[in-house]
Image (tube, rainbow, N blue to C red):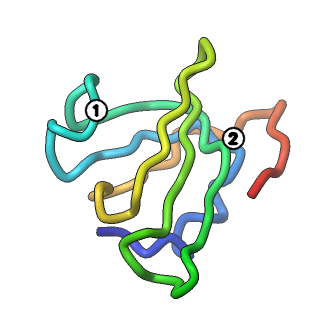
Amino acid sequence: MIKLEDYTKYLGWVVKVTLVNDQICDEGTTIEGFFLGYDFAVCSGEEEDNVSIDMGGGWVYGLNVSDIKEITPLYKNSKAKKQN
């Protein structure tokens, strides 16, 4: 599980997300997309903190931090809008 506050600086970047197992989404254990937003749970650092990854074509994954093994920034999206 990641600590969300370590990754908020990559909001607006295209990122690779490595998941803890292949049962979380149809794409397997790795997805790439636009880091669209994040939401801290009432108690920051808890498993319920989550991130939104825009896969394009209207498909957005909402992932709990407990599902994420690692987030790797790939490149900054020049058309990014800051959302959280």
Q: Quadrant of the N terminus?
A: bottom left
Q: Residue 25: give its label.
A: 1
Image point (39%, 63%), residue name = 65
Image point (28%, 24%), residue name = 27
Q: Closer to us: mark 2 or mark 1?
A: 1
62 lies above or below 68 = above
Q: Quadrant of the C terminus?
A: bottom right
45 lies above or below 2 = below
Image point (24%, 40%), residue name = 24
**Residue sitting farthest toward the top:** 57
Nearest the eye: 74 or 47? 47
Position of 84 with respect to 6 (left or right) is right
Image point (60%, 35%), residue name = 34
**Residue sitting farthest toward the bottom:** 43
Position of 78 with respect to 8 (left or right) is right
Gap between marks 2 and 1 measured at Cα:
24 Å
SS at mark 2? strand
Position of 43 with respect to 38 (left or right) is left
Position of 17 with respect to 84 (left or right) is left
Q: Residue 54: give its label.
A: none
59 lies above or below 54 = above
Residue 81 location (% of width, % of height): 84, 42
Q: What's the amino acid at mark 1?
A: Cys
Residue 2 location (% of width, % of height): 36, 69
SS at mark 1? loop
**Residue sitting farthest toward the front:** 42
Name which of mark 2 and mark 1 comes first in the sequence: 1
Q: What's the amino acid at mark 2?
A: Lys
Instruction: Identify residue for label 2.
Output: 76
Residue 11 location (% of width, % of height): 68, 53
CA neighbours of label 1 inside 10 A, class few (<14), some (14 to 19), many (20+): few
Residue 5 location (% of width, % of height): 56, 75
